[in-house]
Amino acid sequence: MLQFDTLSLSAKDQALILTINQPKSMNALAREVVNDLEAFLDWFETTGFEYRGVVITGAGEKSFVAGANIVQMNTMDEASFIAYARQMHSVTERLEALQVPVIAAVNGFALGGGCELALACDFIYSSERASFGQPEVNLGLVPGFGGSVRLPQRVGKAMARELIFTGRRIKAEEALRIGLANRVVPADELIDAAVAAIAEIAAVSPTAVAIAKRAMVSMDGLNVHDALAKEADAFIAAYHTEDSVEGRAAFVEKRAAVFPGK
């Protein structure tokens, strides 16, 4: 398994746990962190598919990711600043495109870029002490790592506008209520809950999960007619996989399916 300066990797069952390991800076998204996230994705996209899912969390008890590294941002010239934003856009899009599910295990502050990183994951599990927000307006900024696109998809346009325009921070229970988080659990159970979700996913067809994820990402922003066409394409593609042949045969034969992953 690769070693990184700002990230740590560990495996539990069929889940790969990626920890942003910069607790002194509240795991802020410095350029070095973003570079390591890109390197992780390069590795996982070519060699990491022995795992059935990825769990992203932050080191320490206080913060998932506190946001962009504002101190570092203040030293950037315009070209560096633009490159930084585009690099994070690339990271979030690549997370969405991974063939396996990605779960954000939010253990503390998920603010600004941290909330946006969590939004790029397939869903969010939150500890009871976590908090979320897009506070960029307090700095005279706006979301720059996908928040103004992905937050409305999770919580609706009006709620997203309220959170972005006010910069208000919300606690875990409110994040659950508005649909930003899927579950809220005690902090000491957070990683186990995410790993258990990966284990549940690992019991079904990996090709079906990959096709479903790819199709759902491609449907975002489409009208119903065009989205249904994408769904039909995905349904046909899944039907022709070896996993589908095995799954349908197992159903007819009343036995457990053994999916080949093809």
Image (spheres, rainbow, N blue to C red):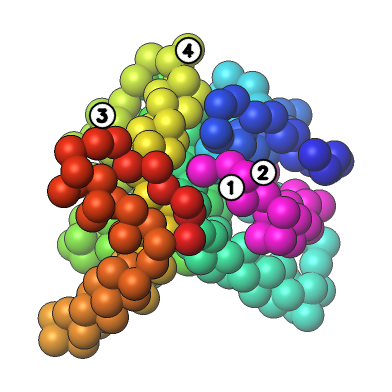
Q: Main secondary structure of the magenta part?
A: helix
Question: Which residue is rendered at x = 55% and y = 33% of the image?
Answer: 14
Vertical position of residue 103 compared to residue 14: above or below: below
Image side of residue 204 versus residue 61, left or right? left
Looking at the rendering, the stretch of residues picked out in magenta corresponds to 27-52
User: Dividing the picture into quarters, in which one does residue 127 lie?
Assistant: top left
Specify whether residue 28 is painted magenta.
yes
User: Dividing the picture into quarters, in which one does residue 126 lie?
Assistant: top left
Q: Gap in Å between the C-alphas at discs 3 and 1?
A: 21 Å
Residue 173 circle label: 3
Q: Position of residue 30 (x, y in %)?
A: 74, 51
Q: Gap in Å between the C-alphas at discs 2 and 3?
A: 24 Å
User: Which amino acid, by three-letter code, is at mark 1?
Assistant: Gly
Circle 1: element type: loop
Q: Gap in Å between the C-alphas at discs 2 and 4?
A: 22 Å
Q: Gap in Å between the C-alphas at discs 1 and 2?
A: 5 Å
Vertical position of residue 192 compared to residue 225: above or below: above
Q: Position of residue 57 (x, y in %)?
A: 57, 34
Circle 4: element type: helix
Q: Are marks 1 and 2 in contact (CB under 8 Å)?
A: yes
* Residue denoted by label 2: 28
User: Dividing the picture into quarters, in which one does residue 177 lie?
Assistant: top left
Going from the N terminus, do you reach mark 2 or mark 4 first? 2
* Residue denoted by label 4: 188
* Residue denoted by label 1: 67
